[in-house]
Amino acid sequence: MLTLPFDEPTSHQTSSPFRTSWTTNQFVKPVKSKRGRALEEDALEPRRADKDGDEEKKEAGGSHKKTLSQARLDRVRLRRIEANARERNRMHGLNNALDSLRKVVPCYSKTQKLSKIETLRLAKNYIWALSEILSTGKKPDLLTFVQTLCRGLSQPTTNLVAGCLQLNARRFISEPGGESFSLYPAFYRNHGPEVAGSNPGDGGGPLRPFGSLCGPYEALCDSPASDCASPLDTGTFSPSSNFNGFFSLKHEGADGLPELPLRPLLDQPGLFVRPRPLRHPPGSVLPGAGGIKQAHPYRELFIKIQLNPPP
DNA sequence: TAGGCCATCTGGTCCT
DNA sequence: AGGACCAGATGGCCTA
């Protein structure tokens, strides 16, 4: 029985699209935006209408009325603060769940996280793609698989996902001391048949040997694709032509299937994905409402994918 | 500087 | 009454 590791991370990290890791620093120090301060000040001093509407106003005795109003005021203030804290925790839980989701969809990276909306879209497409495989029982061609995964995704995300599915993992996870760029969802790391060794940069469970790590597409097949090597390794780049008006490819392999569609065309003009660099050192707390904390060093990665120009 | 993305606060609504 | 959920508003950070 295959169980997905939907364990909630302990950290309170959230993320942003192709950006670096973010960490709210509410547990480091309370930071409020100007808006937040203004609103909290409002909470500390409830509206006049609220006080005017109080039944205490009808009561006789100025001192007594003032005491009751103050008590009510304090209570309103406390409830608002508590509600804010609950809402923060709720959103943190939601973000943790999103982080868990990021780990089980293709193209998981600690340093280049997908945005919330892109994570949800990719997850939906991934579920759809897997469902299709289960229902048809057929091995999909890589192009169809990638197309399904990238349906509705933004162009940068499409490039990233396509690159993840095409590039050899060694290019991304063999960097000593660097973060991993795992092409496999967490469940495959934990349940893969050739589990051996571990990747300290990933912080997770053991990884499959790099040599057998070809991508989520191969994970779906009965046997690893014959062409597991990255085009970067083989150096067989080629110009592209249209395919279904979406992705590009040119050649067909001996089996009639598209040969390395979506291969990175490093020497040709095309779209590229470049993670946003970190301006601040790791662990530093950024000023501002979000209390963003940089968690990972800047790491540059270029993925060029030839795509059709937008209509 | 604009746009994207994010965290946070807030008040309303619904449910227990 | 109180908590969960939701959506709007706001402002900060970052990249192009």
Image (tube, coloured by chain):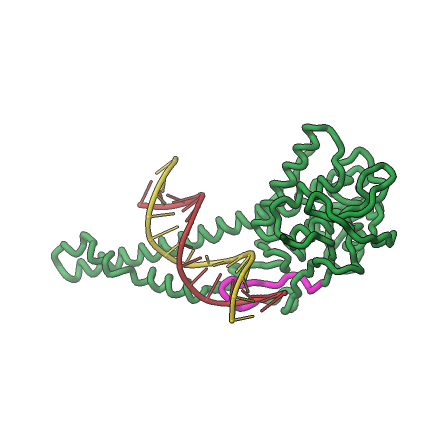
Chain colours: A green, B yellow, C red
Along the viewing direction, whichever of A225 and A198 lies nearer the viewer: A225
Residue located 83% across and 51% down the image: A231
Along the viewing direction, whichever of B13 and A199 lies nearer the viewer: B13
The answer to whether residue A99 is visible is: no
Residue A295 on the magenta segment: yes
Left or right: where A170 falls relative to A28: right
Residue A163 on the magenta segment: no
Residue with the most extreme front position = A311
- Quadrant the N terminus of chain A occupies: top right
Residue A28 figure quarter? bottom right
Q: Is the magenta stretch mostly helix, strand or loop?
A: loop
Residue A67 at x, y = what percent? 22, 59
Left or right: where A273 falls relative to A84: right
Q: What stretch is highlighted in magenta?
A: A285-299
Residue A141 at x, y = what percent? 76, 38
Residue A4 figure quarter? top right
